[in-house]
Amino acid sequence: MEGLISGKIPDLTEISTSKLSSLDTAPGAALGSTRRKLRDEDVAPILATLDQHGIHILHIIGGNDSAETGMSISNEARIMGYDLKVVNVPKTIDNDLTETDHCPGYGSAARFIAQATLGAGRDAAAMGISSPITIIEIMGRDAGWLSAAGSMYKRDRYDPPHYIGVPEITFYEDVFLLRMEEAYRENGYAIAVVAENIKGPEGAIGGQTEPWFVDDFGHPYYDGPARYLAEKVSRRLGVRCRHEKPGTIQRSFMDSVSKTDAMEARMVGEAAIKAAAAGETDVIVSLVRGSNSPYKCDVNLVPLGKVAGNTRTLPEKYLPDESGNTSGEFKEYLEPLLGEPLQIPEHLLR
């Protein structure tokens, strides 16, 4: 988008086939990304750049904010009489787009989180009294899809996580501390997975009243809760509590890419190209699940207006309980998105 506004866009025809093929296993957005909210004054230069290069098809890759951007550009092009087909391509690890079963990017990030939670649990159990508790802070501004994925390999009360905090459920510090103490006393270790944007009755965790940053879309950013909560746990229990914040590693760690996710990312891209070539516009590709076993998924087209500005949160049947469990229904939903099953090692000394 920044390139369209500035008039500086790359010529992909000059890039070798081998380099383009390498994108299949490359982290990040190859053409760059932006958190810029489209301004009224941006649309004219965008259309000028498109016109200059004879471009009449625009694919915007992203989530609900990107859907708003696509609608704005398409509407202005229509007013100005410029022939433009806008077909968005879904992509967000937050998995919070409406009108789709799931979003490309989610399966791989969820796989990383499921593995990280399992690994952090085994590490804390091994470290014992020297470092028995870990709090993992997970991305997901308004929805707990990613945090809930931490429960994937939990089989019983001993397995991690022992607490999951999601934006959909009001966070109560006393309940959290009690649960961590109970898990530690019972198991000798404890793991919590908390979303970066959990809120208590008074708002942001830790008594923060003002965000340290607000992006172009009006989304406020606060200090994450993990560090604050780790200090509270350490003081209450008198043991070391680690706080881990994988941050952008969650969405860029290539060894955790789900093969299902990678395949569907290509599938929605190809579907967007075919849709635009067929004359479709003002739509976004969606994923429609046919079955879980065997897993089958197809594509559909949805009007951008149904997606723009909307957020899909965890439905009640998928919400975690206070002990870090999620329902069998959620795990059935999540499992095929993670790709190849992870072999879970048995507890040697349990």
Image (cartoon, grey):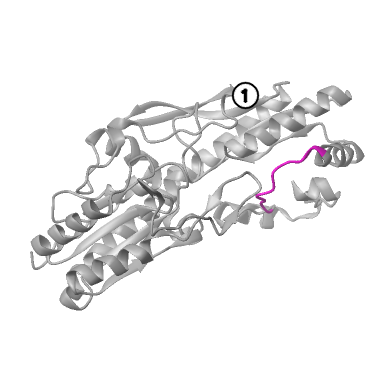
Q: Is 36 inside the magenta-drawn segment?
A: yes
What x and y, as percent, mark residue 262?
50, 45
Label 1 Cα crowd, 10 Å radius (few <14 / some 14-19 / many 20+): some
Q: Is residue 276 left or right of residue 332?
A: right
Locate residue 43, reporting x and y percent.
Answer: 82, 37
Q: Quadrant of the C terminus?
A: bottom left
Please, is residue 182 above or below residue 146 in the view? below
Q: Secondary structure at mark 1?
A: helix
26 is higher (above) or lower (below) than 296: below
Examine the rendered structure and indicate whether residue 302 appears above or below residue 272.
Answer: above
Q: Label the magenta part by its dominant secondary structure.
A: loop
Judge from the rendering whether residue 334 lies leftward or rightward of residue 197; answer left or right.
left
- Report if residue 161 is visible in the image: no
- For residue 190, say whether it is visible: yes
Dot 1 amino acid type: Gly
Question: Viewed as shown, does residue 244 lie left or right of 278?
Answer: left
Q: Which residues are magenta?
A: 32-40
Q: Report the front residue among 22 and 151.
A: 151
**The stretch drawn in magenta includes residue 94:** no
Q: For mark 1, what is the residue?
A: 305
Q: Residue 260 location in percent, x, y?
A: 44, 42
Could you say which quadrant of the image residue 60 lies in? top right
Residue 276 figure quarter? top right
In the image, taking residue 118 as reference, residue 349 lies left or right, namely: left
Q: Nearer the viewer, residue 112 or 317?
A: 317
